[in-house]
Image (cartoon, helix red, strand yellow):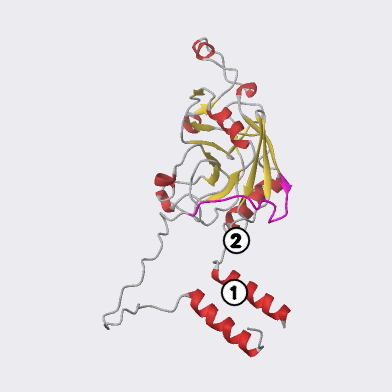
Amino acid sequence: MKKIKNILLSALVIGSSGLHSYTNATEVQIQTVLGNINVALFDEATPETVDNFLLYVNSGTYANTVFHRSVPSFIVQSGGFAFNGTVPPDPIPTNPPVINEPEFSNVRGTIAMAKLGGDPNSATSQWFINLNDNSANLDVQNGGFTVFGQVIGDGMEVVDAIAALPIFSQGGVFSELPVRNFTQADANNGVAVGGDNLVIVTDIVIVNDVVDSNPDITPIENTRINPPSPPPTTGNDGGGSSGGSIPLFAVSSLFFAAVLRRFKVL
């Protein structure tokens, strides 16, 4: 009977704590010419987005891609173009778009999917890392941008190093291209940006495929796109009762109390 009681009490705790376990995460490593960035992915809360991202990872599509966009105090972006010996880089092949999953907030250190303007469900391969708290903008813009992971360890040091690089325009989508070992004097003298100047992602690999491998990550929920429901209004019956249905916790408590009485373990 003691075993039954423990099982039921554990189930009660799970039932009252919500549907998602936000600590579950596969860990990947974004390997760049400036250092490695480890990222914990939110497998359970944003499953479609993570599956889509890992499809590119496992196929090797992200190898030799570049950080093609850097916006100071905002984001650095990659996942769309590969260096194949020429500048500007070439677009990578993409899979069908993935459904939007704006569960988490675009705060500093999170990784999110880029997408087309005016189409919430248009993300394919491109992703970006938030340099600052961009939640007021990106949590609601275009249906909210899907945050699907969080940089861990000292990864933001590498991200900040990329963000600190000078930015030069190469036209089109490369108008905010971060470059290294390249100066304004070089540009003035007609020196062309080459492969040695690009911030290349040599590969992205899975370093830990255990889903609960990062129990200490603390993602912040996106409450701007899905604000919490208002509290139930007070009824007019003079007794101060609330309208609406019985809370889940109350139902769970009544149910488990009844079961425990049935087994006489209270």
The label number, if any, that marks residue 182 in the structure image: none
Q: Is residue 59 above or below residue 263?
A: above
Amino acid, disc 1: Leu
Q: Earlier in the sequence, mark 2 or mark 1?
A: 1
Viewer-nearest residue: 257 or 55: 257
Image quarter of the C terminus: bottom right
102 vs 24, left or right, is left
**Residue 150 lies in the magenta stretch:** no
* Residue sitting at x 56%, y 83%: 255
* Residue sitting at x 49%, y 77%: 250
Image quarter of the N terminus: bottom right
- Secondary structure at numbered mark 2: loop
Tell me which segment is drawn in magenta: 206-221
**Residue 216 lies in the magenta stretch:** yes
Give the dominant element type of the magenta stretch: helix, strand or loop: loop
In the picture of the structure, the residue carrying the numbered disc 1 is 12
* Residue sitting at x 59%, y 70%: 13
- Residue 249's x, y, as percent? 51, 74
- Residue 165's x, y, as percent? 54, 24
Q: How many numbered marks are there?
A: 2
156 vs 121, left or right, is right
- Residue 19's x, y, as percent? 56, 66
Amino acid, disc 2: Ser
In the picture of the structure, the residue carrying the numbered disc 2 is 21
Would you call the spot at circle 1 few (<14 residues within 10 Å), some (14-19), or many (20 or more)? some
- Secondary structure at numbered mark 1: helix
